[in-house]
Amino acid sequence: MRFLSPQTSLSLRSLHNSIAPSSQTNSFTLSRSVAAAAAMDSSSSTPCKLVLCGKSSAENEIAKSLMNNNSLKLPDNVQVSTLLHSEIIDKQQQQQNEESFCIERFMNSLSTNQFGRLLIWSPKLPSTHDVVSNNFGELPIGAVCVADVQYKGRGRSKNVWESPTGCLMFSFTVQMEDGRVVPLLQYVVSLAVTEAIKDVCDKNVVSQDVSLRFDSLICTHLGVYDLFQGLPLIDVRIKWPNDLYLNGLKVGGILSTSTYKSKKFNVSIGKYVSFSVIYNCIGLNVDNEKPTTCLNAFLRELSAAACALRREDIVAAFLNKFEIFYDLFINGGFQTLEELYYKTWLHSGQRVIIQEKNENQVVENVVTIQGLTSSGYLLAISEDNHMCELHPDGNRYIGVTFPDIYCSLG
Ligand SMILES: O=C(O)CCCC[C@@H]1SC[C@@H]2NC(=O)N[C@@H]21
């Protein structure tokens, strides 16, 4: 493994142009300031509505106590109004609003033992990340927060995440004791998103009519459909470390943050333990074509008769998938998912140029991406057979076309 000195600044670009450059204009993480985004919220004086719903009576009891004790808080003194889904009288009216998240539909598709069993839904809030991170102590692990609109959406590298209707935006928590594997969890999340989208496409077969089946047959013949029946598979791919790409365009992203909690008393095992809490946040453009593309626009291009994907189905399928993957990851390590991960990411065998900047000189080296290192960075091999580790560099753009990663300390 080659180790590079801290002073060395390396940038990296692909030799192939198979992936669109990750520029600030074709992603959702536009560099508008968070303050400007917050100022856009004209209704900040009205309380933020949080609707709680449990999968079973156990989680509904937790929901009731959160509401009765006014436990849920938001930063910046944003007022919160907590409601129980079971007590909303105008449920029927809500369901008629096509754009609103259908809680019943989500709960019916959810089949997990832990993740997503307590749902917090809001028609409009600052950021789902703020809800799960500010209320960690109150919420059961795995509680999920979904918003129809965010007015203070966060992207990585302090970017703003544009969060209009049609974008699926949700966050949930995970608690882990082994800090060494925490950096790999975000890859489990990415993989669960791409697999969930495939699952939803597969399952939609039951709702298709005869004409779509006929359509599907023709397309299968043409090689567009992966399955004899079912919606065309939407092949969302992972652009390391945390972007989701469809047809060369960014369609979603993952933001994972973590905090370390030292020596808390664990009642169930009767001893003090240290652990990390990871806030996993997902933004996926399901139904809004701006500024790049969305899953449903892609589907419509494949088949005019295809049913649109619904956010409720995707979040539920994600949590179902994530629970299975998380179990494999915790019990067998990331290697249990590695093969699938490498099939899904965009980088296997990709040749990239590393630019090493030393004072005024730029030296270029070609390396080939091999996979991930045990700590979750990119493992690459140079033409003279030296291994090196490539680190992400947020959105820094160093005058090269691809990607937004560069090589730093090994
Ligand atoms: O920069 C990225 O690509 C990651 C974007 C993550 C956006 C999601 S949307 C739901 C959650 N709430 C936020 O404020 N951000 C994340």
Image (cartoon, grey):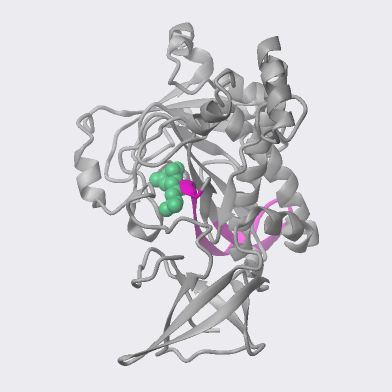
Asked if 128 appears above or below 19 in the picture, the reply is above
* Region in magenta: 248-277
266 part of magenta stretch: yes
| Number of numbered discs on residues | 0
Tell me which residue sits at (63%, 32%) in the image: 316
Query: Which of 275/102 is in front?
Result: 102
Query: Which of 115/389 is in front?
Result: 389
Residue 227 location, quadrant: top right
Quadrant of the drawing holding the C terminus: bottom right
Q: Residue 236, image x and y in percent?
A: 59, 44
**Residue at the far front in the pictured view:** 222
Asked if 256 appears above or below 102 in the picture, the reply is below
Q: Residue 10, image x and y in percent?
A: 44, 81
314 part of magenta stretch: no
Tell me which residue sits at (67%, 15%) in the image: 208
Residue 329 location, quadrant: bottom right
Q: Residue 194, image x and y in percent?
A: 62, 44
> What's the magenta bit mostly, secondary-structure-wise?
strand
Q: Residue 258, image x and y in percent?
A: 51, 59
Tell me which residue sits at (51%, 89%) in the image: 4
Tell me which residue sits at (24%, 43%) in the image: 37
Q: Is residue 367 visible?
A: yes
Q: Is residue 134 visible?
A: no
Instruction: Describe residue 184's horizontal placement relative to residue 217 as left or right.
Output: left
Quadrant of the drawing holding the N terminus: bottom right
Query: Which of 130/338 is in front?
Result: 338
Query: Which of 259/102 is in front?
Result: 102
